[in-house]
Image: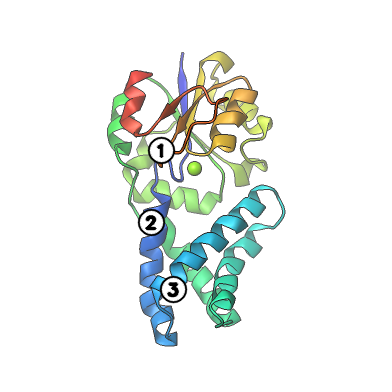
Amino acid sequence: MTHIFFDLDHTLWDFEANSKSTLVELADEYLAPKGILLEEFFPIYKDINAALWKRWSMNDIDQVTLRVSRFALTLEALKKPDAVLADELSVQYLKRAPFKTQLMPGALEILDYLSPKYPLHLITNGFKDAAEVKLKSTPLGSYFQEVIVSEVFGVQKPHPSIFQFSLEKTGANLEKAWMIGDNLDADVRGPITAGWNAIYYNHFQQPKPEDIPFEIHHLLELKKFF
Ligand SMILES: [Mg+2]
């Protein structure tokens, strides 16, 4: 039987929108009183955050460093270094962001379509607490039989061992396991290397690399596959 595994952030849970709405709140409460505008803060934060996530995914920095540095480095780039404020922003961001509920377009519709037909599971790179809150705060939590979180397993996608572990945990067969996600390495090349099938969720309509077999631009296009 076909088992379908979804990525969570940027694939079902709209990370960009939820992150932005959290930062809008924090800007009102913490940045505005210090004379910092979200319009100047956000573009710098976005680049710094992306660079730090990349380093975290390569095990170059740990999660604590990632969580605080993205705010500390942004404040430094704005010539307003403030370690206390960076700590507070980090704490508040982590507390609030997972409770945001914006999902990617078509997310619930495609899960409603797939869930009566196939066992659905999640494989997410990230933190256990945050993943649990996201699943409880949105309707997403009710669709998945198994939720595999890299922090709990100890290894992240695209390492083959997390895909092997996911097969064992779900009883899925290699040839009938499908991974769907937005990250070319973590969600597509990783599972394909492990012998799975994979579909690239190319939400931003980037050029599709030649080695990637399947892509969709909208989640509802999955109906063509399943
Ligand atoms: Mg993702």
Tell me the colour scheme of the image.
rainbow
- Helix or strand or loop: what does disc 2 sit on? helix
Q: Amino acid at mark 2?
A: Asn
Q: Which residue is mark 3?
A: 40
Which of disc 3 and disc 1 is earlier in sequence?
3
Q: Residues within 10 Å of mark 3 (few under 14, many from 20)?
A: few
The residue shown at (60%, 80%) is 83
Residue 84 falls in image quadrant: bottom right
Asked whether disc 2 touches disc 1, contact meaning CB atoms under 8 Å apart, the reply is no
Q: Residue 52: image x %, image y %? A: 61, 58
Instruction: Name the foreground residue: 7 vs 40.
Output: 40
Res 18 label? 2
**Is the residue marked 3 within 8 Å of ligand 1, measured from its CB?**
no
**Is the residue marked 2 within 8 Å of ligand 1, measured from its CB?**
no
The residue shown at (51%, 67%) is 44
Q: Amino acid at mark 1?
A: Gln
Instruction: Name the foreground residue: 158 vs 81.
Output: 81
Asked whether disc 2 touches disc 3, contact meaning CB atoms under 8 Å apart, the reply is no
Mark 1 to mark 3 CA distance (whole Å): 27 Å
Q: Residue 66: image x %, image y %? A: 61, 61
Which of disc 1 and disc 2 is earlier in sequence?
2
Residue 75 falls in image quadrant: bottom right
Mark 2 to mark 3 CA distance (whole Å): 19 Å
Q: Which residue is mark 1?
A: 205
Instruction: Name the foreground residue: 145 vs 35.
Output: 35
In the displayed structure image, the side of residue 133 where residue 115 appears, left or right: left
Q: Amino acid at mark 3?
A: Glu
The residue shown at (61%, 68%) is 69
- Helix or strand or loop: what does disc 3 sit on? helix
- Helix or strand or loop: what does disc 1 sit on? loop
